[in-house]
Amino acid sequence: EPEVTQTPSHQVTQMGQEVILRCVPISNHLYFYWYRQILGQKVEFLVSFYNNEISEKSEIFDDQFSVERPDGSNFTLKIRSTKLEDSAMYFCASSELDLNTGELFFGEGSRLTVL
Amino acid sequence: GDSVTQMEGPVTLSEEAFLTINCTYTATGYPSLFWYVQYPGEGLQLLLKATKADDKGSNKGFEATYRKETTSFHLEKGSVQVSDSAVYFCALRWGKLIFGQGTELSVKP
């Protein structure tokens, strides 16, 4: 069964360092998303991406964040200068269609710990 | 804005007990509603969905009915198993997917 894969599964970094989280969406999907879950809190929307552009972003997704699809398979989330409060589980998701009825398929997440 | 509210957890049940996890939503449009499940150490998996009012989604013995009049999408299962222990997330989609805060379920043998 096709699946969304994410790397790394866990990354520890120092405050102020740049971090890149990588995702390989399901191959025929066209819509890509990043969500995050701070420990014990709800899963929050960060950004959606289609046709090499950001479709929508949340207030959380400030200038420290960026997304990119550098090739035909990867979808990355970059945090330019990490802060302690960026510590969270980051989930990548993809969907085939951008319909409200469509399911998002999630990866297993990348846990980011900022020290 | 749009939002989802779930009952507080954790919920602890004995095996074969009846499960209800309440979920209500606020939305300006006509969203689809979803239940996702997160097993320990794993990602989010779709459990079931309903795309319009009065639809019932069902999967693995779980079911939920889209109630527009009460803006609810409560998750139910008649007889839970230890393997159902997980965190359950109610979500709506009107554009982006918006999650509730999650409800942890623990089923004891």
Image (tube, coloured by chain):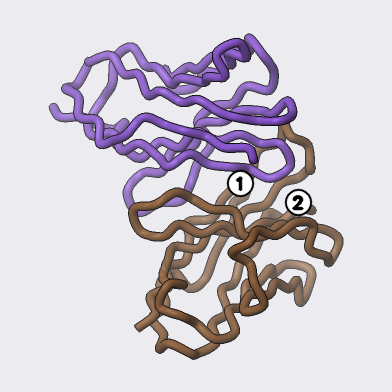
SS for dot 1: strand
Give the chain ID for the purple colour: B
Relative image position of residue B102 (x, y in whole percent): 40, 40
In the depicted view, which residue is nearer to us: A96 or B101?
B101
Return the chain for callout 1: A
The residue carrying mark 1 is A105
Work out whether residue A73 or residue B38 is closer to the camera in this orientation and state it. B38
Position of A86 relative to A107 (above/below): below
Please report contact status of discs 2 and 1: CB closer than 8 Å, yes or no: yes
Instruction: Looking at this view, name the residue that lies furthest to the front.
Output: B1
Q: At 56% across and 61% down in the image, what residue appears?
A: A5
In the image shown, does A8 or B23 lie closer to the viewer? B23
What number is the disc on residue A16?
none
- Mark 2: secondary structure: loop
Q: Which part of the image, by quadrant, shows the N terminus of chain A?
A: top right
Residue A80 appears left or right of B63 = right
Whole-percent x, y for residue A25 in the image: 67, 58
- Chain A pictured colour: brown
Name which residue type carries label 1.
Phe
Residue at image position (46%, 80%) is: A83
In the figure, A33 relative to A10: above or below?
above
Residue ID at (71%, 47%): A95
Tell me which numbered mark, 2 or 1, is placed earlier along the sequence: 2
Residue A29: give its label.
2
